[in-house]
Image: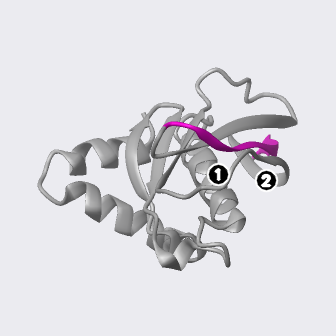
């Protein structure tokens, strides 16, 4: 079990523990902190992260900005990947394919499942789906990562 999963499980047992985990996660990646992400599920190979519908993440149309959606996609992918990647491997993002399906007019939730990936190849394409509060898909992302030995 990864350190992230262990820490999340341990902290989530206590009042305010999940908030402490979310603050620590945001501090590890300062750029991401502007989203104020909330991890709502974390287990080996799987992560779900939510972002509230706030003015700070809006674009000129008053909807969640496409850059915020992509940043959320990268965050949830990285968190899910970190929970299962073997200790002798490392990764770095090298590209992405994005499809914006509709305007995000509400809070959003991103999900990534890395539980069935083969980590002993050079490249992976990792799927991420972002949904609005009605469960409708607002973005699909394929984040491309390069894998190598440490």
Dot 1: what SS? helix
Quarter of the image with the N terminus in it: top left
Across and down, in percent, residue 63 comes to 60, 66
Q: Which residue is mark 2?
A: 93
- Residue at figure coordinates x 80%, y 42% from the top left: 147
**Residue 22, picture quadrant:** bottom left
Horizontal placement of 37 versus 137: left or right? Answer: left
Q: Nearer the viewer, residue 92 or 33?
A: 33
Q: Is residue 18 left or right of 134 when viewed as pictured?
A: left
Q: Which mark's residue is nearer the viewer, 2 or 1?
A: 1
Residue at left offset 81%, top offset 35%: 124
User: Which residue corresponds to the image point at 46% horizontal and 64% vertical from the top-left?
Assistant: 53
Q: Earlier in the sequence, mark 2 or mark 1?
A: 1
Q: Quadrant of residue 110?
A: top right
Q: Position of residue 74 (x, y in %)?
A: 66, 54
Q: Residues within 10 Å of mark 1 (few under 14, many from 20)?
A: many
**Magenta run includes residue 133:** no
Residue situated in front as seen by the camera: 1 or 55: 55
> Magenta residues, as a range?
135-149
Q: Is residue 148 magenta?
A: yes
Residue 131 drawn above or below residue 31 = above
Please, which residue is most extreme toward the front here? 61
Element carrying mark 2 = strand
Q: Position of residue 19 (x, y in %)?
A: 27, 62
The tag on residue 116 is none
**What type of secondary structure mainly makes up the magenta span?**
strand
For label 1, the residue is: 73
The answer to whether residue 13 is left or right of residue 32 is left
User: How far is disc 2 from disc 1 in space, using C-alphas?
Assistant: 12 Å
Residue 135 horizontal/vertical position (percent):
50, 36
Answer with the quarter of the image where residue 58 lies: bottom right
Number of marks in picture: 2
């Amino acid at each position: 079990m990864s350190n992230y999963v262990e820490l999340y499980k341990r902290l989530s047992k206590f009042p305010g523990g999940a908030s402490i985990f979310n603050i620590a996660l945001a501090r590890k990646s300062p750029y991401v902190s502007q989203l104020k992400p909330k991890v709502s599920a974390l287990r080996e190979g799987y992560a779900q992260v939510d972002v509230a519908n706030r003015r700070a993440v809006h674009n000129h149309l008053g909807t969640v900005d496409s850059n915020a959606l992509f940043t959320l996609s990268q965050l949830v992918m990285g968190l899910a990947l970190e929970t299962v990647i073997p200790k002798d491997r490392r990764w770095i993002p090298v590209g992405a394919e994005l499809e914006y399906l509709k305007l995000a007019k509400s809070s959003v939730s991103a999900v990534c499942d890395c539980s069935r990936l083969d980590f002993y190849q050079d490249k992976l394409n990792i799927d991420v789906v972002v949904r609005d509060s009605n469960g409708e898909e607002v973005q699909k992302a394929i984040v491309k990562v390069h894998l190598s030995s440490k």
